[in-house]
Image: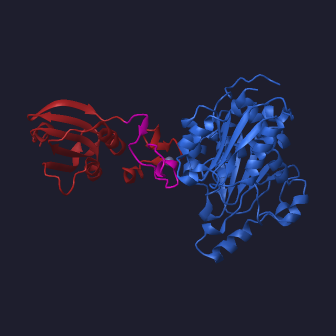
């Protein structure tokens, strides 16, 4: 294993905005190489504080910790946590700090993970704070793209679906400001366009075009997100728009042979099941990649 | 009417000059001036200024500004100057300055932000850019620009 150079030891992982290209690359290098090793984190304890349930993310973190020999404590959902009895998040964090070596937190309020990180001296990983950030998802997305394309520079990337409320696409777009020769195609209905605040961070760094047409031609990566019914004032408008962004076999005819199709999962009907068999469909692989990325992260943060 | 004359009109208090034109009402709100305030307040709007074209000005008798108040004024009127008047004379004069971090000064506009929950934590913004104004919440990372900052005060 390589030595750690770029300041991962003991740090917090709250927002993709906190990370440089070098730091991202170092983590991904470790993620490509890491193998299960029950000795590596033996005796270390990860506190998994899920104030809202997310089975997928929770399992991925727990699996990562256990494959390196560590223990997992914690809870999922407000029930079972003392928060239900009115304890503040800061007090919960201070108590948990006594039992664990690292904290993983998911919480419905934006900024909650940063607050916990500022409260305790242990490393804290944000596993999703409301609509704000979910950096390990983004790191997993980058890992998957790097794995199939062998690079994170010089890529044409299409982001498809709900670009307004989709946390994963905001974070992924921001991550690509760290890389070179990236072109973004932002494909969304008019009312679900990428927020101006995110576009402002791309301006002058990552060129992008916005379109409402499902044009998947000539892209290296197609990243699909779900369009939710709640975002539309009336059901008719929703049905009309939803249909225009379904990735089915017909839409996939536009895909390049070496393109990869990603989705943060769970999907509902935005990618039809018959697409799963196409060589470009990599979303299940993407989900599995969450484990080595989180293993590498735990190892670097705990300095093992 | 020259500036000296305007400044010298109150006996003791504060003159806030070079306020961005049109922002005087917001400065009054920051100062908490409204019904129930009995001190003399003089407001001038859209006055010609050599430095910034048109400007507003607010004079308040018997009033000193707290640090927090000066920071708030800097958010809406970055070129403002504060004159402290004692016995009709300018006893002290300084320009407002926006610090690089604002703690507990403006609330976060994001209702789902941890600083708007029951947690004991102050709002905390970092100033990403002074001109044009851009503030980012340290916690929820929401970006606030100059056009929307007045509603947060
Ligand atoms: Zn906030």
The answer to whether residue A203 of the structure is visible from this angle is no
How far from the left and from the top, in percent, is residue A11? 64, 31
Q: Answer left or right for B95 relative to A145.
A: left
Asked where in the image residue A297 lies, by quadrant, the reply is top right
Q: Main secondary structure of the magenta part?
A: loop
Q: How is the image coloured?
A: by chain
Residue A146 magenta: no
**What's the residue at 84%, 50% (across, down)?**
A259
Q: Is residue A4 above or below residue B72?
A: above
Q: Nearer the viewer, residue A133 or B26?
A: A133
Q: Answer left or right for A54 relative to B36.
A: right
Q: Is residue B29 above or below residue A154?
A: below
**What's the residue at 62%, 41% (across, down)?**
A15
Position of the N terminus of chain A, as image quadrant, is: top right
Q: Which residues are magenta?
A: B98-122
Position of the C terminus of chain A, as image quadrant, is: top right
Q: Which chain is blue?
A: A
Q: Determine the colour of chain B.
A: red
């Amino acid at each position: 294993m390589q030595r750690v150079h770029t300041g991962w030891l003991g740090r917090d992982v709250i927002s993709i905005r906190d990370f440089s290209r070098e730091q991202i690359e170092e983590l991904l290098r470790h993620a490509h190489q890491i193998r299960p090793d029950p000795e590596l984190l033996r005796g270390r304890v990860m506190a998994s504080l899920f104030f809202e349930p997310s089975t997928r993310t929770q399992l991925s973190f727990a699996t990562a910790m256990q494959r390196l020999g560590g223990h997992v404590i914690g809870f999922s959902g407000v029930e079972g946590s003392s928060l239900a009895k009115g304890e503040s998040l800061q007090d919960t964090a201070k108590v948990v700090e006594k039992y664990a070596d690292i904290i993983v937190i998911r919480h419905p309020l934006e900024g909650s993970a940063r607050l916990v990180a500022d409260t305790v001296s242990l490393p804290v990983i944000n596993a999703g704070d409301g609509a704000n950030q979910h950096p390990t998802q983004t790191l997993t997305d980058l890992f998957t793209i790097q794995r199939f394309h062998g690079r994170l520079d010089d890529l044409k990337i299409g982001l498809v679906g709900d670009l307004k409320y989709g946390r994963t696409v905001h974070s992924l777009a921001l991550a690509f400001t760290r890389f070179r020769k990236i072109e973004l195609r932002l494909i969304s209905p008019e009312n679900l366009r990428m927020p101006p605040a995110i576009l402002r961070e791309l301006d002058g760094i990552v060129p992008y075009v916005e379109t409402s047409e499902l044009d998947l031609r000539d892209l290296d990566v197609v990243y699909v997100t779900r369009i939710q019914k709640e975002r539309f004032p009336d059901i008719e408008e929703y049905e009309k728009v939803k249909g225009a962004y379904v990735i089915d076999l017909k839409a996939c005819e536009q895909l390049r042979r070496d393109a990869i199709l990603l989705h943060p999962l769970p999907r509902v009907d935005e990618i039809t099941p018959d697409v799963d068999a196409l060589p470009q469909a990599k979303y299940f692989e993407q989900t599995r990649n969450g484990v080595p990325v989180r293993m590498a992260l735990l190892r670097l943060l705990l300095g093992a | 009417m020259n500036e000296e004359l305007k400044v010298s009109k109150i006996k003791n208090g504060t003159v806030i000059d070079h306020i961005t034109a049109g922002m005087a009402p917001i400065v009054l709100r920051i100062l908490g001036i409204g019904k129930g305030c009995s001190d003399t307040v003089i407001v001038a709007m859209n006055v010609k200024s050599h430095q910034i074209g048109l400007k507003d000005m607010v004079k308040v008798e018997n009033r000193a500004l707290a640090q927090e108040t000066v920071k708030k004024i800097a958010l809406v009127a970055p070129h403002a100057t504060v004159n402290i008047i004692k016995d009709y004379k300018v006893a002290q004069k300084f320009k407002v300055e926006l610090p690089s971090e604002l703690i507990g000064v403006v609330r976060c506009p994001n209702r789902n932000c941890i600083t708007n929950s029951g947690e004991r934590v102050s709002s905390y913004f970092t100033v990403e850019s002074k001109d044009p104004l851009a503030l980012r919440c340290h916690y929820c990372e929401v970006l606030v620009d100059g056009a929307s900052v007045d509603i947060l005060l």
